[in-house]
């Protein structure tokens, strides 16, 4: 997309893209968040009982509360999409099972 395209875009569409960006982290950020989750899991499994549990934000020096909310929203959106996909797959299985019986 060029600057000209952005300039020609209606403000409502531009605002929509800005909101989308604020709700869903970029791919690089998502990878860092995934790695931070894995690091905190590993650290918690191997930590001494006297040490407080680690959180993913302990492994993300740039992490802020705003990004935590954004990440939580992205995770919830991903989970909802997965649930919808599961429902669609179950409906498709039932449909094809019934179709096979008819044939």
Image: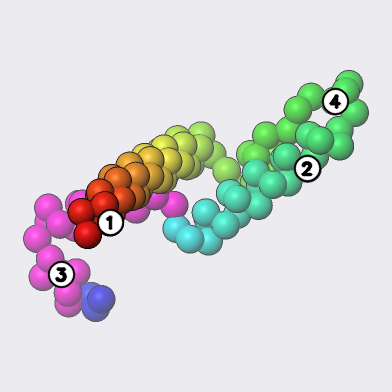
Cα gap from disc 1 to disc 4, whole angstroms: 58 Å
Cα gap from disc 4 to disc 2, whole angstroms: 14 Å
Question: Mark 3, residues whose alpha carbon is within 10 Å: few (<14), some, or many (≥20)?
Answer: few
The reply to whether residue 103 is visible in this rendering is yes
Secondary structure category for the residue under label 1: helix
What is the magenta range? Answer: 4-25
Q: Is residue 89 left or right of residue 48?
A: left
The reply to whether residue 77 is visible in this rendering is no
The correct choice, above or below, for 13 with respect to 67 in the image is below
Q: What residue appears at the point 19 percent right and 58 percent down from the top-left corner?
A: 14
Cα gap from disc 2 to disc 3, whole angstroms: 47 Å
Secondary structure category for the residue under label 2: helix
Residue 76 image position (x, y, % from top left)? 41, 37
Residue occupied by mark 1: 100
Q: What residue appears at the point 50 percent right and 37 percent down from the top-left corner?
A: 68
Residue occupied by mark 2: 42
Dominant SS of magenta comes to: helix
Question: Mark 2, residues whose alpha carbon is within 10 Å: few (<14), some, or many (≥20)?
Answer: few
Residue 23: quarter of image: top left
Cβ atoms at labels 2 and 3 below 8 Å apart: no
Residue 86 image position (x, y, % from top left)? 38, 45
Give the mark nearest the N terminus, 2 or 3. 3
Q: Nearer the viewer, mark 4 or mark 2?
A: 2
Cα gap from disc 2 to disc 1, whole angstroms: 47 Å
Most foreground residue, 23 or 42: 42
Residue occupied by mark 3: 7
Cα gap from disc 1 to disc 3, whole angstroms: 54 Å
Which quarter shows the C terminus?
bottom left
Secondary structure category for the residue under label 4: loop
Question: Mark 4, residues whose alpha carbon is within 10 Å: few (<14), some, or many (≥20)?
Answer: few
Give the mark nearest the N terminus, 3 or 4. 3
Residue occupied by mark 4: 51
């Amino acid at each position: 997309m060029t600057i000209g395209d952005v300039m020609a875009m209606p403000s409502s569409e531009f605002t929509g893209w800005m909101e989308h960006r604020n709700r869903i982290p970029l791919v690089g950020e998502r990878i860092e968040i995934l790695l931070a989750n894995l690091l905190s899991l590993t650290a918690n499994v191997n930590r001494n009982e006297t040490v407080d549990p680690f959180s993913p934000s302990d492994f993300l020096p740039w992490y802020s509360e705003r990004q935590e909310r954004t990440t939580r929203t992205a995770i919830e959106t991903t989970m909802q999409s997965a649930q919808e996909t599961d429902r669609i797959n179950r409906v498709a299985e039932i449909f094809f099972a019934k179709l096979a019986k008819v044939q």
